[in-house]
Image (cartoon, rainbow, N blue to C red):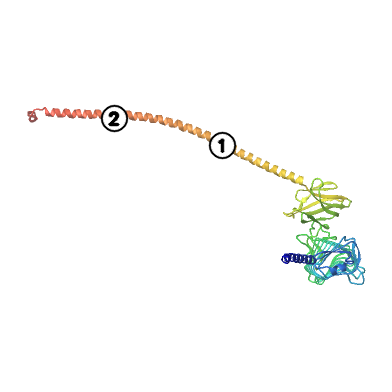
Amino acid sequence: MKKVASFPLLFLLLLVAMVATRWNMSVAGSPGTLEVPSSKYLTIQDAINDAGSGDLIFVHDGIYSQNLVINKSVSLVGEDRDLTVIYGSGASSYVINVIANGVTITDFTVRANSSIQSPVTVSSAGNVLENNIFEEGYNGIQLFSSNNIVSNNTIHDNEYAGLNLFASNYNVFSDNLIVNNVVAGIELDQSANNVFSGNTIYDNPEGLTLSFSASNNVFYHNNFNNTVQLSSTSVNSTNVWSLNGEGNYWSDYTGQDSNNDGIGNIPYNITRTEGPDSYPLMGPFHDLEVALTGQTYNVNLISNSSISGLRFTFGQETGNKIVLFNVAGGGGKVGFGRIMIPLSLMGMPFIILGGQGEITPTVLNASNSANVFLYFTWVDSNQTISIISSKTLHLYNDLLGEYANLLADLNNLNVTQSSFLANYSTLLGNLADLESRYFALNSSYYSHLSDYSKNVKNLQNLMYVFAATTAIFLITTVYLSKRANTSTKQKPKGSEKED
């Protein structure tokens, strides 16, 4: 009995052990988080070496003097990009060398230790470099690969170019600040089909350098303010300089905006070989990404004033949705703003307030069911501009709309009533006419009946006379006939002879 009873117990223990083992294997094989520094990982490279594919390596604030080779698909995340610093060491040509696909690097300052060392070199695909600072090296970012995303980085004070692409295609570069590099902001060499949008490239001797067969790249919503905006030795290049009717801001553009839509009226001539930017922006481009209720919205602004602090918030008391930005300046210059707001983020109507009070905007023809485009102006001074999506005004306008509809319905009722009254008057006139005709017809009818009665009586009298005359005639005829027969019978025979 004891042996029989122990079998289920042993089976149960074995099952529990198998489940526990399987759970431990599952946990060990799933992506995890490795922290640096920790008792287990003193250096970032130690964590990379021990990490598995998909792991996240979280690096606390500090200065890490080392060179990294990232040969696994991991996410490298700093605690604070200004305080988490990877400083190159030795004579290596890179601080970080990314050779694995699918790597993410975010929230670091990556600083070279010499002018021949690049902060980051990427030779693999599908990587993301986001919200970093790459500084004081040879090329801030050296790219030899495709299908990467480089976004929201600051790239400055590098000995050659801020961003250098060689034989790199189908990459996306957005919202990067590329400033004060010694030779060029961006250099494209034998690279094609890349997209550049929302980048600010300024204070570089050359903003953009196109070498050899750099073609089919798309540039829009970028801000160029450099000694030379662009130089090109690319042969037969066919790069695109706008998207959906909006190009780039060029600090040396001298055209006008006569129709007040934030877009220049004449093209900006880039180079003889590159052709023009047909839709140059009249001011620098600013982009605001708003994350709300699980959705991401992009608000963008074009302005010729010095703009800072573009942000989204809610009214503390009203709950209204508000986009704000600060304007710095003076001297009486007229500033303008052309803002695009997704209607799914903020609905019309809008109230715009500035330092001088309310500003009346113009709704541009580019507006559609998805986005509204507003154009407005101000006199430059230190002030905050607020674009408010007012719930109260929206309800007030709804009520005004309903009131207008009611007035229209009432007016239609009045028109219908007037028409009814006019028709009623016509009907009354027709009724009076019918009554008059009826009475005339009725009088004629009774006159006709009287004449008919008289005629009937006359006919009766005539018939009586005719009947009497006929009777007398018949009586007379009968009488005379009888009398004649009587006289013939009484005459003597001899009298016939005498006759």
Q: Is residue 261 visible?
A: no
Foreground mark, 2 or 1, reads: 1
Check disc 2 and report the residue beneath it. 466
Front residue of this view, candidates 468 and 63? 63
Q: Is residue 475 visible?
A: yes
Image spot of residue 464 (x, y percent): 30, 28
How far is disc 2 from disc 1 in space, using C-alphas?
58 Å
Q: Is residue 418 left or right of residue 128?
A: left
Q: Amino acid at mark 1?
A: Thr
- In what quadrant of the picture does the C terminus appear? top left
Front residue of this view, candidates 154 and 332? 154
- In the image as oriented, which residue stretches furthest toward the front? 1
Crowd class of label 2 (few under 14; some 14 to 19; many from 20; radius 10 Å):
few
Residue drawn at point x = 12 percent, y = 29 percent = 489
Element type where label 1 sits in the image: helix
Image spot of residue 232 (x, y percent): 83, 69
Check disc 1 and report the residue beneath it. 426
Crowd class of label 1 (few under 14; some 14 to 19; many from 20; radius 10 Å):
few
Front residue of this view, candidates 42 and 18? 18
Q: Quadrant of residue 228?
A: bottom right
